[in-house]
Image: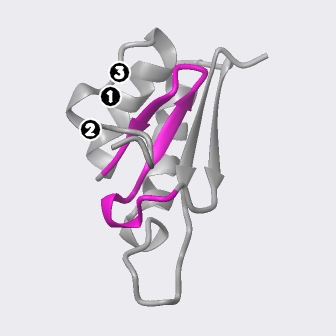
């Protein structure tokens, strides 16, 4: 069983709204996975997923079971996300409220 699981939105909307997929989420996932392999972190998961809700804050992601939400992510945030997955220390600079909570 995975210790932590990161879901990253890769939705590519065609309706003209901002979309996580068009804003670099696929590249972010690749960089996170590359770093996890380097760290030999085999007990965490990274999964691309559909829309998580806050399109204008994308790319967005959520870490379970922690329930920590992230927004406006870039490839440069990969080290901090990997740190969260491995040690449980959130990337505070990119934390956001869960959709519908504010």
Q: Would you name the residue on which mark 3 appears? A: 90
Q: Which residue: 43% across, 72% down?
A: 19
Residue with the most extreme right position: 1
Q: Tell me the SS state at disc 2.
A: helix
| Residue 69 part of the magenta-drawn span | yes
Foreground residue, 53 or 33?
53
Residue 51 pos. (x, y %): 57, 62
Pointer 1 with pointer 2, Cβ within 8 A: yes
Nearest-to-viewer mark from 3 and 1: 3
Q: Residue at x 48, y 68 (%)?
A: 21
Residue 45, above or below 12 = above
Disc 1, SS: helix
Q: Which residues are magenta?
A: 53-71
Which residue is disc 1 drawn over? 80
Q: Residue furthest top?
A: 87
Q: CA distance from mark 2 to mark 3?
A: 9 Å
């Amino acid at each position: 069983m995975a210790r932590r699981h990161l879901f990253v939105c890769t939705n590519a909307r065609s309706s003209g709204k901002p979309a996580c997929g068009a804003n670099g989420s696929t590249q972010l996932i690749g960089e996170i996975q590359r770093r996890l392999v380097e760290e030999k972190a085999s007990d965490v998961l990274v999964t691309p997923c559909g829309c998580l809700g806050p399109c204008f804050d994308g790319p967005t992601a959520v870490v379970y079971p922690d329930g920590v939400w992230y927004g406006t992510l870039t490839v440069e945030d990969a080290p901090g996300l990997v740190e969260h997955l491995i040690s449980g220390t959130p990337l505070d600079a990119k934390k956001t409220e869960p959709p519908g909570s504010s």
